[in-house]
């Protein structure tokens, strides 16, 4: 399954549970908190000051 920037963190974790480790490695330790579940990957990257392209590449490996 290909992860897109418009997917919520909740969708990403549900469909690809191993993505939680990738997100944590990028400093997103709160991937399971309720507010993070509704954020899109793009929003989460922006909030955490991350490069969206690098994050997307890592999530889709």
Image (cartoon, rainbow, N blue to C red):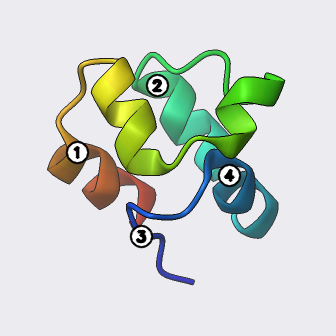
User: Badge 3 is on which residue?
Assistant: 4
Could you tell which of marks 1 and 2 lies nearer the N-terminus? 2
> Which mark is in front, 1 or 4?
1
Q: Which residue is mark 4?
A: 18
**Residue 60 % position (x, y):** 40, 67
Disc 3 crowd, CA 10 A, few/some/many (<14, 14-19, 20+): some
CA distance for labels 4 and 3: 16 Å
Query: Does 32 sit above or below residue 38?
Result: above
Spatial CA distance of label 3 from label 2 is 18 Å
Residue 11 falls left or right of residue 58: right
- Distance CA(mark 4)–CA(mark 2): 12 Å
Residue at (17%, 52%) from the top-left corner? Answer: 53
Left or right: residue 46 versus residue 35 is: left
Mark 1 element type: helix
Residue 50 at least partly seen: yes
Q: Which label's residue is closer to the chain start, 1 or 4?
A: 4
The picture places residue 55, in percent across and down from the top left corner, at: 31, 45
**Labelled pair 1, 2 in contact (Cβ < 8 Å):** no
Local SS, label 3: loop
Q: Quadrant of residue 43?
A: top left
Label 4 crowding class (10 Å Cα cut-off): few <14, some 14-19, many 20+? few
Nearer the N terminus, badge 4 or badge 2?
4
- Residue to which mark 2 is pinned: 25
Q: How many other residues sit within 10 Å of disc 1, few (<14), some (14-19) or many (≥20)?
A: some
Q: Earlier in the sequence, mark 4 or mark 3?
A: 3
């Amino acid at each position: 399954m290909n992860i897109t920037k418009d997917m919520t963190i909740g969708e990403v974790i549900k469909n690809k549970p191993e993505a939680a480790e990738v997100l944590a490695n990028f400093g997103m330790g709160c991937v399971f908190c309720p507010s993070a579940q509704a954020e899109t990957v793009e929003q989460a990257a922006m909030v955490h000051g991350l490069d969206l392209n690098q994050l997307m590449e890592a999530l889709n490996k």
